[in-house]
Image (spheres, rainbow, N blue to C red):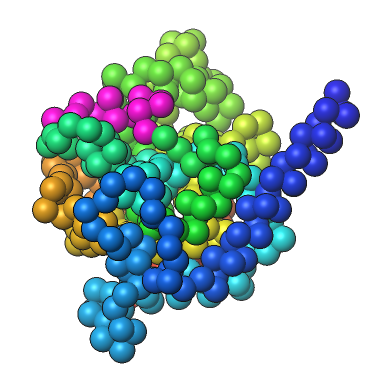
Amino acid sequence: MRKPKINRMALAMCLGSFVMLIFYFQNHLKPAQDSGQARGPRKSVRSPLQALYTTDPTELSPLQLMHQSRRDLLEDVCHSYTNKRRVLIPEDLKHLIVDDHHGLLYCYVPKVACTNWKRVLMVLTGDTQRDPLQIPANEAHVPGTLRTLSEYSTSEINQRLRTYLKFVFVREPFERLVSAYRNKFTRSYNTAFHKRYGTKIIQRHRAEASPEALERGDDVSFSEFVRYLVDPGTQREEPFNEHWERVHSLCHPCLIHYNIIGKYETLQQDSSYVLKLAGVDDEVTFPSSAKSTRTTADMVASYFKDISLAYQKKLYNLYKMDFLLFNYSMPAYLKFT
Ligand SMILES: *[C@@H]1O[C@H](CO)[C@@H](O)[C@H](O)[C@H]1NC(C)=O
């Protein structure tokens, strides 16, 4: 049992060090001088990454300055908080969706408009022009529909990391978490999540659970969900499900130098900016989302009323990197400080 594991580790380290080498160069690269993007017919000569960096730094618009300050802040937080010796392995790149037609890399984060971004990328990488909203949501999530960076060879990975525009969309961490809870545990149709996670949460975190609750797992409370998240045994057993895993772990923002950090709070504006950089803003429009079932800040605060101060603190510590990296302040409803 032990030996193959060590060999796999060595292989992973080896692949990782290749990827790391390129990350080192990535910092010093002047993208405007890069001649990548030669492959495939393209209308525009400039790649999205080149488009981002062609503006004279003294003439940046307020929008460009805001994105610059998001990148700078993230870089600062990475330097002060993270272990720089962590290496990246292809396994870490499973959330990065590749658009080889336009030169885009998108790290998808569930509960941050990822269905709409996947739809848009299906339109951009497909050969038929369609309205993104005509693609059914479930079709956008079928594995294999879009290619992820982990499927490529190491040299192909490095070439793409160096020359493509890398972007991610983030959201206030607890708003995202409550949104995931509401979507996965309070909707009767999500039976797969109830069976897979709900039954386990009730079994471990509810005293004197009824046989029906143990069997169905469909009435998990938010405080039971929080206890499941902060229980160290949960992550020892398996990684968090992507719906509540931290962006820090899904997208590795301290190792992958994202060019655009989009936010759910400014979704339309940031999405349009990415599409403009990609030179496709006249071909595809980012769908505006229906606000009816949206999780609001007030709603989030009401969920936290039932959480003890000790658990509020544990939960904040769990998601702390996502708060810091993306400049979200500690919510005012948290009372443990
Ligand atoms: C961080 O957030 C604060 C308050 O929301 C804001 O004033 C500031 O400009 C932000 N900084 C960056 C670098 O985005």
Which is more toward the observer, 56 or 325?
56
Q: Residue at x 58, y 39 (%)?
A: 153
Q: Quick check: 37 left or right of 134?
A: right
Q: Residue at x 54, y 23 (%)?
A: 200
Q: Residue at x 13, y 48 (%)?
A: 283
**Rendered location of residue 7, percent (x, y):** 82, 34
Q: Residue at x 49, y 15 (%)?
A: 214
Residue 87 shown in magenta? no
Residue that sits furthest to the bottom in the current view: 58
* Residue 267 occupies quadrant: bottom left
**Rendered location of residue 57, percent (x, y):** 34, 84
Say how many tags the image has: 0
Which is more toward the observer, 136 or 148?
148
Please identify the quadrant where the N terminus is shown: top right
**Rendered location of residue 277, percent (x, y):** 26, 61
Question: Is residue 297 visible in this depiction of the protein?
Answer: no
Q: Quick check: 311 left or right of 35?
A: right
Q: Quick check: 228 left or right of 2?
A: left
Which is more toward the observer, 213 or 237?
237
Residue 164 sits above or below residue 226 on the image = below
Residue 148 sits above or below residue 75 on the image = above
Q: Give the extent of the magenta segment.
A: 133-146
Question: Is residue 98 visible in this depiction of the protein?
Answer: yes
Residue 142 shown in magenta? yes
* Residue 236 occupies quadrant: top right
**Rendered location of residue 125, percent (x, y):** 29, 38
